[in-house]
């Protein structure tokens, strides 16, 4: 199926937060400014998705819905086909988004006053969701070397040597620096977290948006020990 990624689609006056809230958010700005402040695609949705929504709409009743077995099987098949990761249905849990999932996880695995590690510069809602759930942010800043970001292992070891640190939110691939973490890096991080009894929460929503020559490795796929000590968050969007 072919798609025209060069087509420019006018999204104004469709209640688009990205376009219609520009002036409300940033004040008066030139008309030719591109709104790159929201991760919101400018391409049409795939035709099969549009047709499925049309079919559901024609039914005319918008009641509560369940998730059929095909929903879970689609995830299982995708993970194995794209990432060589065999997941089981019992491992899968639905949430309305990655950020709400992070909120659920923090509430489930921490107490007020506990600490959560993040690796800035990173997706800004991480900070808000930690603090909104009564925890403290622990920054393990990435190091920039030769135009590439790396994890500061010495700083991480020092920061996690604290019994109040309960979780580490891993952004993999990393947003916004674009790092696709190598297996060796993930192993080091996983071993550090195992040693300090810290659960890894791996946000892998960008796993399928990679340049050629790069390969995403799901953190939980590396070993059973890592799988048992981690929660993976992902989405089809």
Image (tube, rainbow, N blue to C red):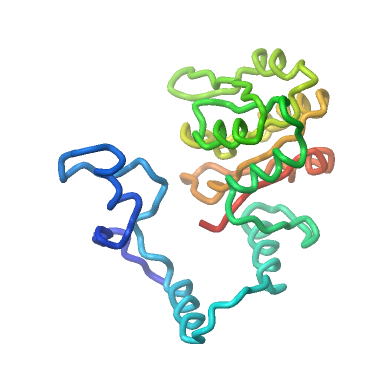
Q: Is residue 217 left or right of residue 123?
A: right
Write the residue at 15% across / 40% down.
30
Relative image position of residue 42 (x, y in whole percent): 34, 56
Q: Is residue 14 left or right of residue 48?
A: left
**What quarter of the picture does the N terminus occupy?**
bottom left
Relative image position of residue 204 (x, y in whole percent): 60, 45
Write the residue at 48% across / 72% down.
49
> Vertically, is 180 above or below 195?
below
Residue 227, quarter of picture:
top right
Q: Is residue 10 left or right of residue 198?
A: left
Relative image position of residue 174 (x, y in whole percent): 54, 36
> Vertically, is 27 above or below 69?
above
The mark total stands at 0
Residue 32, quarter of picture:
top left
Closer to the camera, 77 or 91? 91
Residue 109, quarter of picture:
top right
Write the residue at 77% across / 29% down.
198
> Vertically, is 217 above or below 44?
above
Write the residue at 73% across / 57% down.
92
Relative image position of residue 176 (x, y in whole percent): 46, 35
Q: Is residue 186 left or right of residue 206?
A: right
Closer to the camera, 217 or 42? 42
């Amino acid at each position: 199926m072919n798609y025209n990624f060069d087509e420019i689609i006018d999204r104004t006056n469709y209640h688009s937060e990205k376009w219609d809230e520009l002036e409300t958010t940033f004040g008066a700005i030139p008309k030719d400014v591109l709104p790159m402040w929201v991760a919101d695609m400018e391409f049409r949705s795939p035709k099969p998705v549009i047709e499925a929504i049309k079919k559901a709409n024609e039914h005319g009743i918008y009641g509560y819905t369940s998730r059929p077995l095909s929903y879970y099987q689609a995830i299982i098949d995708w993970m194995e086909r794209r990432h060589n990761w065999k997941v089981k249905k019992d491992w899968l849990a639905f949430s309305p988004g990655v950020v709400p999932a992070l909120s659920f996880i923090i509430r489930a695995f921490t107490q007020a006053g506990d600490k959560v590690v993040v690796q800035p510069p990173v997706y800004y809602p991480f900070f808000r969701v930690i603090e909104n759930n009564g925890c403290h942010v622990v920054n393990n800043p990435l190091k920039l070397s030769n135009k590439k970001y790396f994890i500061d292992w010495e700083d991480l070891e020092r920061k996690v040597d604290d019994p109040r640190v309960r979780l580490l939110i891993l952004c993999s691939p990393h947003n916004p620096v674009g790092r696709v973490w190598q297996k060796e890096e993930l192993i080091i991080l996983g071993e550090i977290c195992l040693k300090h009894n810290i659960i890894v929460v791996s946000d892998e929503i960008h796993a399928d948006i990679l340049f050629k020559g790069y390969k995403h490795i799901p953190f939980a796929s590396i070993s059973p020990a890592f799988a048992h000590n981690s929660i993976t968050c992902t989405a089809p969007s």
